[in-house]
Amino acid sequence: MKLWHCKDARSFRVLWALEELGLPYELVMLPFPPRWAEPAFLELNPLGTIPFFTDGDVRMTESAGICQYLAEKAGALRVLPGDPAYGDYLNFLHQSDATLTFPQTLVLRYSVLEKPENRLPKVASDYKRWFLARTMWVEHALGDGRPWLCGDDFTVADIAVAYAFLLAGTLGHLDEVGPNARAFWERASGRDGFKRAKAAQRG
């Protein structure tokens, strides 16, 4: 297995999952954003996006989908069909990117990545509020005292959602999410798998 990754980009979900699952992999670090900073990458992934992941003939580009693929491959960190938490598991996996990370990518673009003359503070502020409002699903899910999103067991859904809080910390609004979500992030980022993934991307 091989992962193309930029430091703390959405591909971090995959790197973290690989470390938690103990799967062997090759890591290729790229500058961000690779479609501009590493044009040859477009020959591998025409989208120019991160992550890009291969496993034999398998080619994947969606971070949450790759996490699900790895959990199925390893037979761990997943919830099986028939389990009462299976719906939560799938919902959080998809919510992690479509609902929680998407608005933050616009915050990142319009407050950091664009040239100063092209930045749009109103857009960044609006999408930050969007993100914070959407964290309420996580906040309520953890309100019964459960440690992880699907119950007592840590899954790749926790990895996928926790990444959104890593990004919130990078963008400076992690302290605005609710107490349950912040405590969840502290538990997740305290795991050995998270620490190994952070070390791996440092080289």
Image (cartoon, rainbow, N blue to C red):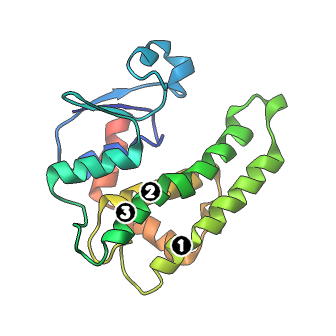
Judging by the rendered image, the residue that carries numbered circle 3 is 90
Mark 1 crowd level (few <14, some 14–19, many ≥20, 10 Å Cα): few
At 38% from the left and 19% from the top, the residue drawn is: 44
- Number of numbered discs present? 3
- Decide if residue 20 is on the left or right side of residue 168: left
Q: Residues within 10 Å of mark 2 (few under 14, many from 20)?
A: some
> Do the residues bearing badges 2 and 1 touch, measured as CB atoms within 8 Å?
no
Labels 3, 1: front one: 3
- Residue 189 seen from this side: no
Q: Quadrant of the N terminus?
A: top left
Residue drawn at (37%, 36%) of the image: 201
- The extreme bottom residue here reads 144
Q: Which image quadrant for residue 177?
A: bottom right
Q: Which residue is mark 2?
A: 94
Mark 3 → mark 1, Cα distance in angstroms:
14 Å
Looking at the figure, which quarter contains the C terminus? top left
The mark lying in front, picked from 2 and 1, is 2
The reply to whether dot 2 and dot 3 touch (C-beta < 8 Å) is: yes
Q: Toward which corner of the image does residue 111 lie, by quadrant?
A: top right
Of residues 200 and 52, the one drawn nearer to the viewer in this rendering: 52
Q: Is residue 3 above or below residue 19?
A: above
* Side (left or right) of 78 relative to 127: left
Residue 202 higher or lower than 197, as above or below: above
Q: Disc 2 versus disc 1: distance between alpha carbons?
A: 13 Å
Residue 5 seen: yes
- CB under 8 Å between discs 3 and 1: no
